[in-house]
Amino acid sequence: MQANTILVIYLVVAVGWMLFGFVRLAYLREFRRFIRWAIIVSLCLLWFHYFPVVGEMLQEEYRSRIMIPVSVLVLILFSSSGPFMTHRGRKK
């Protein structure tokens, strides 16, 4: 697969996940998590948008040491927070 195809697939999944999270959190009226989720999604999308720019600024030896672990952490953060991490307990 070409890099553009992978980027398009990533963006479709990211935007779909983001919209699903927004709708679910808004439906549950958890506005604090809604805003936190929006900030996390925006930071993740900005990171991957500027990933090549930051990677080119770093030297080759530091690129694999810094960029890949940070990207994995960003993906873990992106996939582990948001619409499924809501509290479902009953209110008294």
Image (cartoon, rainbow, N blue to C red):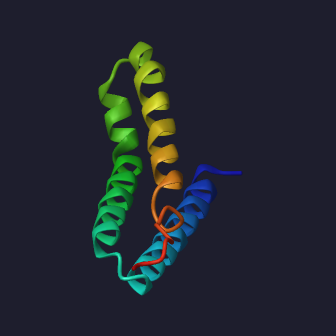
Q: Toward the viewer: 87 or 35? A: 87
Q: Toward the viewer: 27 or 58? A: 27
Compared to residue 39, the image places residue 24 above or below, namely below
The outermost residue toward the front is 92
* Relative to 1, 72 lies left or right: left
In percent of width and height, residue 15 lies at 49, 70
The outermost residue toward the right is 1
Compared to residue 49, the image places residue 64 above or below, namely above
In percent of width and height, residue 50 lies at 34, 46
In percent of width and height, residue 82 lies at 45, 63
* Relative to 62, 80 lies left or right: right
Quarter of the figure that contains the C terminus: bottom left
The outermost residue toward the top is 61
The residue shown at (54%, 73%) is 16
* Relative to 86, 59 lies left or right: left
The residue shown at (49%, 68%) is 83
The residue shown at (41%, 78%) is 91
The residue shown at (47%, 72%) is 21
Q: How many marks?
A: 0
In percent of width and height, residue 49 lies at 38, 52
Compared to residue 26, the image places residue 51 above or below, namely above
Q: Toward the viewer: 26 or 46? A: 26
